[in-house]
Amino acid sequence: MVVETQETQAGLPVDWELAARTAARLMPAGPSVDRALAQRAVDLLRADAAIAEGHVREITGLGGGLPLLPADVVDRPAWAHAATAGMAALTSGARLPAVPATARKLTATTAGLQAGALLSYLGSRVLGQYDPFGGPDGEGRLLLVAPNVVAAQRALDVSLDDFALWVCLHEATHRLQFTAVPWLRDYFAAEVTGFLSAAETSATGLLERLPKVFAEARGVRDSMSLVELLQGPEQRAMLDRLLALTTLLEGHADHVMDAVGPAVVPSVSTIRARFTARRRGGGLLDRVLRALLGVEAKMRQYAVGAAFTDAVVDRVGMAGFNRVWTAPETLPTRAELADPDAWVRRVHGG
């Protein structure tokens, strides 16, 4: 149990329950489908989660001997509730300066409404998610959002059977990353906790850095770049490590979902081409929202991480790539993600 002192309080001042309710209320309804198609999509995703992880284990060499766990197929509001529960658990260890109870409650309400609005946007787009801190026991939960999978499959005009399995390959890779690499979950939680706990120190120093921030902000292209400008040196180093890790995780999953080949997903090339075009598309308002919410930066993570994984596997094979999972010290830095040869030289000595 975390004990709060007069100097610090545990966890972010966010009303996560309010965030979940707000997201569920603001989310648009899913696609209109008949009962038979809805049931088929749910059954397909449930079966494909286990099938996909079997393929991921074969491709990556990770997870041998681990049990094949089920996935939870959910609708949009259920995803929002699960996402807020996971975020609450992930951020519960952050230590922030104590504030009066009334002020903290007001802040939590405001932040809960803002988080709910953000989740309402994401909740109509996310196809699946592995939450390492979700589930009844807090040991992890794989979620597949059935209405969003069907909506995306229709928009792409591809086979539902192929697309469902393709999506499951990505999310099963994320689950295997955390279940087959024993130190990764605690490392990720510690990095997030450290980053959030350092926020107050960074905010204090921000006043001294404002002239430089304003000068450099003129060249900022996206919200993530602005976030980086606002950090102090210690917090920026933590952010660098978190961004490097999440870029690796997303790129590795994208590499795996395409590496299965047409023997497993017959239309994989078509799905990838159309899905990539859809990631870049959208109307003006959608593109503005994605930029403001950092979704554009997330899209670049997929590309950079996948390019790194592709290059390392080409040079040293999947077994050589798996050296990234040895320890935190063998994870690539942000600089190495753009220079895979540098990582190979550092880790493999050649």
Image (cartoon, grey):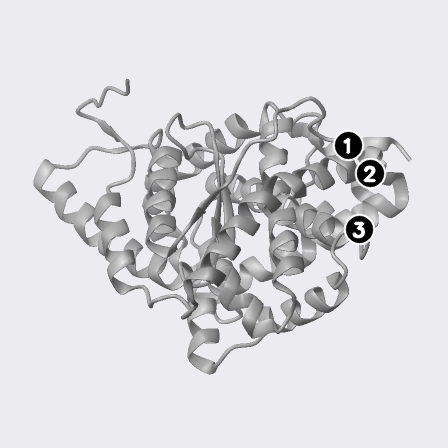
Q: Amino acid at mark 1?
A: Gly
Residue drawn at the location 34% of the way across and 61% of the way down = 120
Disc 1: which residue: 61
Q: Amino acid at mark 3?
A: Asp
Which disc is residue 313 wearing? none
Q: Secondary structure at mark 2?
A: helix
Whether residue 14 is visible: no
Position of residue 279 in the picture relative to residue 293 (left or right): right
Image quadrant of residue 47? top right
Kindly check if marks 1 and 2 are in contact, taking CB atoms under 8 A apart as contact.
yes
Q: Secondary structure at mark 3?
A: helix
Disc 2: which residue: 318
Tell which circle, 3 or 1, labels the residue nearer the N-terminal end: 1
Q: Secondary structure at mark 1?
A: loop
Tell which circle, 1 or 2, labels the residue nearer the N-terminal end: 1
Position of residue 191 in the picture relative to residue 184 (left or right): left
Tell which circle, 3 or 2, labels the residue nearer the N-terminal end: 3
Distance, label 3 to label 2, CA atoms, is: 10 Å
